[in-house]
Image (cartoon, helix red, strand yellow):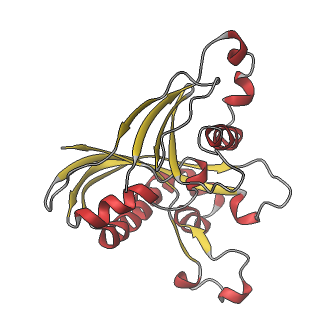
Amino acid sequence: MSLYLSRLTLARDASSAALSSLLDPSAPGEAKNAHHRLLWTLFADGPDRTRDFLWRSEGKGRFFTLSHRPPQPHALFTPPEVKEFAPALAVGDRLTFVLRANATKDRAAIGRLPKVEQKSRRVDLVMDLLRAVPKGGRAEVRQDLASQAAEQWFGRQGAEYGFASEDLIVSDYSAVSLPRQKGRREAYAKFGILDLSGTLRVNDPAAFIARLGTGFGRARAFGCGLMLIRRA
């Protein structure tokens, strides 16, 4: 399986600058939606193409993508910087990482409602913990609950996909509301984002590398799930 890691930057010419408020909005939800559509222009080479790439915004019109095909050149971007992504990992390797993730869990698994009564089977872990806190006190415990949810979720990811967390830092948690569109499922109108970094140890290189290519967590169409790694 070939993968390609690309660094992409919006062009700064006059014609692109005139569209900057549409291509890179300041409101987080509008930005996620616009970036989702914008990056599709680099990979949607046919009407039946399904998404086979992950992406991450670095701010100021800069992005990383991990894809099964190199991105196509596009007038709205400077020429993409592309390299093949084929890490040679062994059991016991230590890596530093950054990951922007939407951490969720099955509602039925946490005793909410029978699945037949649910519009969505998934619940954001941090939002679920915050619901038990009176509204006036949520700001004070938000970061602690985000760290608690992240530790549990990341541990489960590691157990399933061949790595173990050695150090996990939760630098931010935010809730993003997407602009509502006709036909969009209610479950995707709002989702939480954890910004994670730290150090991990590889236990199963094949399982870990395979998951790097498909992404961690949900909301992968909207800039979550791409883990960037570097040897520690």
Q: Residue furthest front?
A: 46
On the image, the x and y values in percent for residue 226 come to 44, 49
On the image, the x and y values in percent for residue 215 come to 45, 57
Q: Residue at x 41, y 66 (%)?
A: 153
Q: Residue at x 55, y 25 (%)?
A: 60
Of residue 153 and residue 129, the one placed in the foreground of this image is 153
Numbered marks: total: 0
On the image, the x and y values in percent for residue 175 come to 61, 51
Q: Residue at x 51, y 44 (%)?
A: 55
On the image, the x and y values in percent for residue 204 come to 23, 67
Of residue 145 and residue 3, the one placed in the foreground of this image is 3
Of residue 55 and residue 46, the one placed in the foreground of this image is 46
- Do we see residue 90 in this rendering? yes
- Do we see residue 25 in this rendering? no
Judge left or right: residue 118 versus residue 151.
right
Of residue 74 and residue 146, the one placed in the foreground of this image is 74
Quadrant of the rendering where the N terminus is positioned: bottom left
Judge left or right: residue 207 versus residue 108.
left
Is 54 placed above or below 128 here?
Answer: above
Quadrant of the rendering where the C terminus is positioned: top left
Q: Residue furthest top?
A: 14
* Quarter location, residue 189: bottom right
